[in-house]
Amino acid sequence: MNILLAMIPAFFWGTTYAVTQYTLEGWSPLLLGALRALPAGLLLLAIKPSLPKRDEWPIIFSLGLINIATFFGLIFVMALTLPSAISGVGMISVPVFAMLFHWVVKKQRPHLIQAIAGAGLIALAWMLFNPSQISLNPIGLGAMLAAIFCIIIGSSITKSLGNRVHWWTVLTWQLIMGGVILSVVTMIHALIDPQTYVNSLMNFDRRNLLGLLWVICLNTALGYGMYVWLLQRMSVVDFTFGGIANPIAGITAGMVLLGESFTITQYSLMFGMIVMSLLPQVIASIKQTRSQTKAL
């Protein structure tokens, strides 16, 4: 049952790219990041008020800067420059980069099955993202790579907190802090290049409003709330299974909202990447089930 619940936030996150292109095309990624983070954080604060302790503010600021301000800005750059399906599928390569990061930085060698799955995922991604097969915006690809490292670094910081800071405080205030940072940067950018913001305000319509409500309420307030709540009740391995809804939502939303279409070979490569990303967790879950069965 928890795995099915884990698919809900993963699904909403997967729709971010197509919904942004369909409803908010031409908007500034900085503005979209601020509008996604700050209202959602304030909404969660209103639901359950909390306040970090004095010594917790530096870590909350770091998480807000990396997990929210930088990551959200990069996500919207991807959403406005890459096909929805490519963004959704590309982000499932996070475990491979996390494995390499921990191997190089923390000298933690990956298990054999992790190495095999990682190598397979890289090979499939190399074929899918091959410039001779598909034309992709290099700025979007750079944003994707940077966003992946934001996830890895932010997750490492969050994990290091342990139980020292209540999860709701971390969730709420990193959104607020990240939203404030993005708001300040957005105002500075608006002074330098006001036309983008003027166009967005002058042409604001119902489609824009629906897109913002989707991104703020469902993708962020509900999605992040469920994400942190579920991590208190299930293992990271189990939660990862729910993540399969992310690329599937990206592919489906791209087809429905944007009319995106790819060749059978490209869809096969996407499916292969999804399988490779889940393979280590599937094998780990099977081993855990067998161990529990033997113990009984």
Image (cartoon, grey):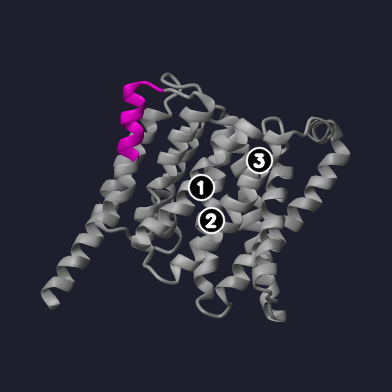
Kindly identify which residue carries mark 2. 223
Q: Earlier in the sequence, mark 3 or mark 1?
A: 1
Residue 249 percent across, percent down from the top left: 44, 40
Question: Which residue does the image show at 38% across and 60% down from the upper left?
Answer: 239
Q: Earlier in the sequence, mark 1 or mark 2?
A: 1
Kindly identify which residue carries mark 1. 12
Q: Which mark is residue 96?
A: none
Amino acid type of the residue tagged 1 in the rendering: Phe
Q: Residue pushed farthest top?
A: 132
Which of 135 and 205 lies nearest the eye of the viewer? 205
Residue 238 percent across, percent down from the top left: 34, 61
> Mark 2 against mark 3, which lies toward the viewer?
3
Q: Is residue 215 above or below residue 283?
A: above
Discs 1, 2 touching: Cβ within 8 Å:
yes
Amino acid type of the residue tagged 3 in the rendering: Leu
Q: Where the C terminus falls, by quadrant?
A: bottom left
Q: Secondary structure at mark 3?
A: helix
Is residue 11 left or right of 283 when viewed as pictured?
A: right
Q: Residues within 10 Å of mark 2 (few under 14, many from 20)?
A: many
Which of 204 and 280 lies nearest the eye of the viewer? 204
Residue 92: image quadrant is top left
Q: Residue pushed farthest front?
A: 206
Residue 209 percent across, percent down from the top left: 70, 40
Q: Which residues are magenta?
A: 262-273
Q: Residue pushed farthest right?
A: 191
Q: Which mark is residue 210?
A: 3
What is the CA distance from the residue labelled 1 to the residue labelled 2? 7 Å
Is residue 228 left or right of 58 when viewed as pictured?
A: left
> Mark 3 against mark 1, which lies toward the viewer?
3
